[in-house]
Amino acid sequence: AGTLRQRVTVEVATQARNAQGGFSESWATENTRYASIEPLTGREFFEAQRVDSDVTHKITLRYYSGLTTSHRIIYGSRTFYIESVLNENERDWKTIAMCRESVGAT
């Protein structure tokens, strides 16, 4: 496993019709995987701010072809919302999710 030591849960947003005729969003578990969770520091944080000022962490997983920004990653009591997904070197062996950690209610 190497650096992929944190067991995370990948959840996907789902919408269901509520009693008032509108929609409510909920989250469903899609997968459980091992990952590496790294806070962005220094230059990485500066580079991430050019794209999205909310990015706070880089989460690396083995290649995950269906991972999108409609997913979120749960690690213990922490919630990470995916801002962008990268296929490292376009080689289909490692997926990097640039995330923002939710502070407070999920």
Image: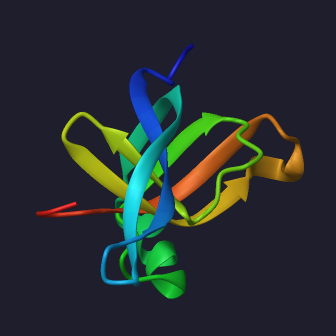
Q: Which residue, as the protein is rendered here, is positioned at the far left? A: 104
Left or right of 48 on screen, residue 86: right
Q: Quadrant of the N terminus?
A: top right
Image vertical order of residue 65 relative to residue 61, above or below: below
Q: Nearer the viewer, residue 78 or 1?
A: 78
Image vertical order of residue 3 relative to residue 86, above or below: above
Q: Residue at x 57, y 66 (%)?
A: 69
User: Residue 57's image quarter?
Assistant: bottom left
Q: Which residue, as the protein is rendered here, is positioned at the far right? A: 91
Q: Nearer the viewer, residue 46 or 28?
A: 28
Left or right of 86 on screen, residue 35: left
Q: Residue at x 46, y 34 (%)?
A: 36
Q: Position of residue 26 (x, y in %)?
A: 38, 59
Q: Which residue, as the protein is rendered here, is positioned at the far top? A: 1
Q: Residue at x 47, y 52 (%)?
A: 58
Q: Position of residue 59 (x, y in %)?
A: 48, 46
Q: How many marks?
A: 0
Q: Nearer the viewer, residue 19 or 53?
A: 19
Q: Residue at x 59, y 36 (%)?
A: 61
Q: Position of residue 102 (x, y in %)?
A: 24, 63
Q: Quadrant of the C terminus?
A: bottom left
- For the rendered model, the colour scheme is rainbow
Image vertical order of residue 103 relative to residue 93, above or below: below
